[in-house]
Image (cartoon, coloured by chain):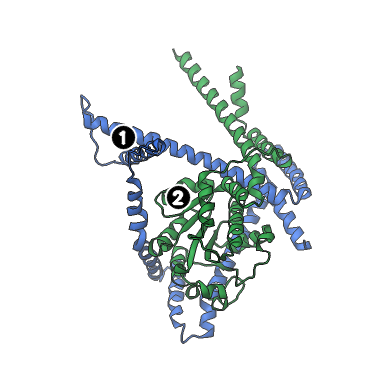
Chain colours: A blue, B green
Amino acid sequence: MSEVEVMGAWLAAVVVVWIYSFVYKDNVLYRFAEHLFVGTAAGYSIALSLDSLNKTAFVPLGKDIVTNWHLIIPLLLGLTFFLKYSKKYYWVARYGIGVNVAVGAALALRTAPMANIIKQINAAIVPLWTPTDLQTTFNNWLMVLITLGGLTYFIFTLFPKAEGKSTSVHKIYRAFFLIGVYGMMVGFGALFANTIMTRVGFLIGIYLQYFQPQPYAAIIAVVLAVIAIAYAMRRK
Amino acid sequence: MTAIEKIDKILSTRQLLYTLLIIAIILPLIYPVGLPIGISSRTKAVYDYIQDDSKVPPGSHVLIEIYYEVAARAELEPQVIALMKQLFEKNCKLVFLSTITYGPLAFQFLQASAPDVFEGKTYGEDYVFLGYIAGQESAVASLAKSITGTVATDNYGNPTSSLPLIVEANDASAYALVIVASSGTDTFGWYVRQWYTPYHTPLLFGALSVIAPSIEPYVNAGQAVGMLTGQRSAAEYELLVGRKGLGIASMDAQSFAHGLILVFIIVGNIVFAYTKLSKRGEKK
């Protein structure tokens, strides 16, 4: 490892500890690490975006402008975005945004009905009786009922009301409505469990990737963070 | 103050929960217990798919989208490394790219984390990194039509038209598989719409645990051949390909942390139910 790499590894370990110190109390080291991260991330993204623009447009234009003249059009459309800051010519920005939105929508709509609607409906049409595999039968029933229940839950415009004595249509509606509610609750529960898994995974990764290779950096950062937290608590 | 109220007060101290959580994670990492790791049928199905020569022929081209920031490395990098190992062992040619600005950094970390996997592989012939490609879904659609038409140079400034691997596989039809390792939900949709639907290129998803339920419908509908989910799938895959990595190393800590959270959820619910019932009793 070169000296620069060691310094980088130390900085990573130290900054990560300071960021995590926020869970105990907001402190000056956390704020320093946060600002450092936001600034670095923004700078890195801008640099890469400009590099991408350079590679995609300016370099080909510089090499052969006669063949690549068409690249000037998206460049000009892109530049119109900045006219949003002009009080007089702000409306020109709409052309750039319009073309951008139109291209995105056209590309997505070309295949979205098949990918996001037809295929999904097809996937929901499943056999409700598989004699050799009872588990599949049970799962398929669950999927169909919860799909219908979820759709029923989101019907806001037309639904059978129970006026006086409840009708059979209303009872069926209520049954699907409840299946939808419980189905979604199970879904949200799974999502919550997965969220915990991801966050815990991040913490484990940070330990293994940053703290374990540089334990002294982490220990020093912890000591400093404890001092900063104590100072922040005393000031309060 | 009753015992339940005391527990309620202790549980309300978030600092305690965080401290216990950190201990529950760090201790098993320092002193591994070696809890058994079972391999799920879904992970095995992905492994078998890639092993199947009729589906992923030896020497075929595979595109890998590295769409994750540094924070998500812990969940996605072990998955990608394990998949890479299996694919390189089949002499597959890998084309890496990223439609997120952090991609080049993530790829740099990937290379540093798995030098053994890249060993003996020649850049430009066995693998290529196209770098960050701006344009999101539009870029993904354009890449499917022509890689050289979308990006003039790779991440290191080499003209894409001079790279033998890209010349061999310049559009979607040349790829046996596309692996999307992403920390974002939208990325999977881009590839389903722009690579699978028009060109029927098989997709394989590598997702964070938190977003797995959101992209499950694509897998369920057969629009992807399978999905690896978080560190758990990474650990299983590492076992299958025989390379111990961060996935396996993290499983003990995952189990202990989840156990602790489960205890907190159960105790929290008991306290909540008791408090609610006692308040109801007081009203009567």
Are circles 2 and 1 on residues that touch, CB within 8 Å?
A: no
Q: Give the class, few, some or many, for how many residues have Cα within 10 Å of label 1's Cα (few <14, many ≥20).
A: many
Q: What residue do we see at 63% from left, 38% from top?
A: B36
Above or below residue B116? Residue B124 is below
As helix, strand or loop, the secondary structure at mark 1 comes to: helix
In-front residue for pair A78/B159: B159
Above or below residue B51? Residue B209 is above
Above or below residue B133? Residue A147 is above
Residue projecting furthest to the top: B284
- Can you identify the residue that label 1 sits on? A176
In-front residue for pair B71/B282: B71
Q: Where is residue B90 in the image (x, y as percent from the top left)?
A: 58, 62
Q: What residue do we see at 29% from left, 41% from top?
A: A155
Q: Point out the image quarter for the N terminus of chain A.
A: bottom right
Amino acid type shown at disc 2: Ile
Chain letter for mark 1, please: A
Q: Residue B93 lies in what quarter of the image?
A: bottom right
Q: What residue do we see at 50% from left, 75% from top?
A: B148
Task: Calculate the distance from the C-alpha at mark 2 to the C-alpha at mark 1.
Answer: 24 Å
Q: Position of residue A2 (x, y in %)?
A: 78, 63
In-front residue for pair B30/B133: B30
Q: Residue A26 lies in what quarter of the image?
A: top right
In-front residue for pair A226/A126: A126
* Marks 2 & 1 on one chain: no
Q: Where is residue A41 in the image (x, y as percent from the top left)?
A: 60, 59
Residue B133 is marked as none
Q: How many marks?
A: 2
Q: Point out the image quarter for the C terminus of chain A.
A: top right
Amino acid type shown at disc 1: Phe
- Can you identify the residue that label 2 sits on? B215
Instruction: Look at the image and tell me whether residue A235 can be seen.
Output: no
